[in-house]
Image (cartoon, rainbow, N blue to C red):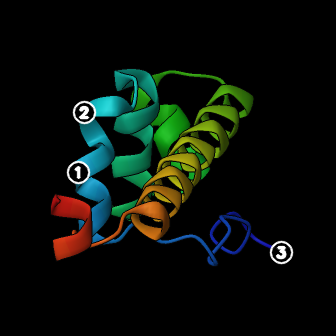
């Protein structure tokens, strides 16, 4: 498996995920953007950022986990929210 194949193709950033970017710490967000938008691989990111490859992989993993968590929180919030009815208004 090469460097590009090992980047968890099952995870993709959706346009709607941009709403979470302000809640992701800059070191994680920068690497997420490089891997998902610039289509760089781990080695290229490590070279460009002058970070160890392990740090790059760790920050990307943790950044993805943050996005997953924020998605889950939004989904849970949307499931519990109900349209107000006339009975609720009274």
Which image quadrant: the N terminus?
bottom right
Q: Residue at x 31, y 45 (%)?
A: 20
Nearer-N-terminus badge (3/2): 3
In depth, the one of 2 and 89 nearer the eye is 89
Coordinates of residue 9 in the picture (x, y in percent): 62, 76
Residue denoted by label 1: 19
With respect to residue 70, does 4 lie above or below? Answer: below
Query: For the residues marked 1 and 2, what is the alpha-carbon distance in whole angstroms?
Result: 7 Å
Residue denoted by label 2: 22
Asked if marks 1 and 2 touch (Cβ < 8 Å), the reply is yes
Which quarter of the figure has residue 18? bottom left
In depth, the one of 85 and 82 nearer the eye is 85
Coordinates of residue 70 in the picture (x, y in percent): 48, 48
Nearer-N-terminus badge (3/1): 3
Q: Would residue 11 appear left or right of 85 to someone viewing this image?
A: right
Query: For the residues marked 3 and 1, what is the alpha-carbon distance in whole angstroms?
Result: 33 Å
Q: Residue at x 56, y 57 (%)?
A: 72
Q: Residues within 10 Å of mark 3 (few under 14, many from 20)?
A: few
What is the secondary structure assignment of the residue under circle 2?
helix
Which image quadrant: the C terminus?
bottom left
Which quarter of the figure has residue 68? bottom right
Q: Residue at x 44, y 56 (%)?
A: 77
Q: Which mark is residue 1?
A: 3
């Amino acid at each position: 498996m090469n460097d590009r194949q090992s980047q968890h193709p099952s995870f993709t950033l959706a346009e709607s995920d941009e709403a979470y970017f302000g809640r992701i710490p800059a070191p994680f967000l920068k690497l997420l953007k490089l891997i998902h938008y610039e289509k760089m691989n781990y080695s290229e990111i490590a070279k460009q950022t002058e970070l160890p490859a392990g740090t790059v992989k760790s920050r990307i993993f943790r950044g993805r986990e943050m996005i997953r968590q924020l998605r889950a929180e939004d989904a849970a919030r949307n499931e519990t929210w109900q349209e107000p009815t006339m009975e609720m208004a009274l």
